[in-house]
Image: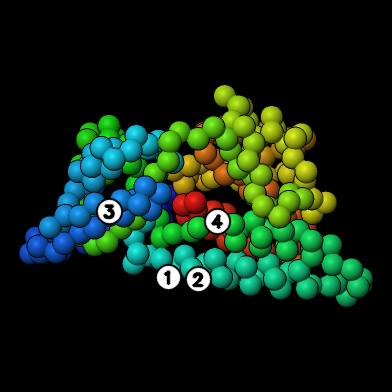
Amino acid sequence: MHFLSSFVFSLLLSTSTAVYAGSTQAVSVTLPNQNVVLNYSQPVRLEQVILDANAQVNFYSLWAVLSDKQLQKDIDNLRNNSIEQLSSLSRETSLFSANNEFKRSATQIISQLEHHTFVGRIFSPLDLDLIRINEKLNPILNADYQLFVHPRPTSVSFFGAIDSESSISVPFIEHAGIDDYLDSLPLSSTADTSTIYVIQPDGVVQTTEFSVWQNKPAYLAPGASVYIPLGGLPSDFSSLNTSIVQLLRNKAL
């Protein structure tokens, strides 16, 4: 997954540079949360955009999301396919029982996802210090973008097999792992807590594993999203959990 993100970003960088060489195309970067549009008469370096955005609002760079409208169709398809699979799962019954143990959980996860906005995210650091010391992290932007910025969050969010129609925000605990939060969560009967997914605010995905043989912790940053997967899924839905995790990497609001 990290390799794919790096490849997409490298492709964007090389394409941007090539276009810039012979282009005076105007560029706009919209800050939806602030109702502000940054306009440029020609392609612009990411560093300049971050500086201009910082002049508008002091934001937490790890939780900032830069999105490209050209990538939006793929994310819309991922969202729609995930919701269609969840809808199908909510109607699934086995050959041995008329009951559907996943119906409630699947319906709740659909509701959780519908409460949020997903965008075609560009997975690149937006920290000025990192951008300035590595030219490869400072691409030329040459289209129309959105930059979602927020102050430093004070909570983390939980999605997935929890007994809730919306994601659950829990106050951030300094240096805490997932197990420090689980006791306060209303987990569904379908939850699989042996492997839990952490989507850090910059989109990096980590897994934490709990078993008799090992304890692989993952520590959460402020603004992280945690996905509690559905366990024991029918074979037709084997990729559902990872599809939802990929979608959550692109969450803007």
Judged left or right of residue 149, residue 181 is right
Taking 232 as reference, is 48 left or right?
A: left
* Pick the front one: 135 or 23: 23
The label number, if any, that marks residue 116 in the structure image = 4
Query: Residue at horizontal 43%, vertical 36%?
Result: 151
Element class at badge 2:
helix
Residue type at mark 1? Lys
Foreground label between 2 and 3? 3
Indicate the amino acid at tag 2. Asn
Query: Whole-percent x and y of residue 56?
Result: 29, 40
- How far is mark 1 from mark 2, CA to CA? 6 Å
Disc 2 designates what residue?
77
User: Does residue 165 appear in this view?
Assistant: yes
> Do residues under tags 3 and 1 come within 8 Å of each other at their CB atoms?
no
Q: Nearer the viewer, mark 3 or mark 4?
A: 3
Q: Are marks 1 and 2 in contact (CB under 8 Å)?
A: yes
Residue wearing tag 1:
73
Dot label at residue 37: 3
62 shown above or below 237: above
SS at badge 1: helix
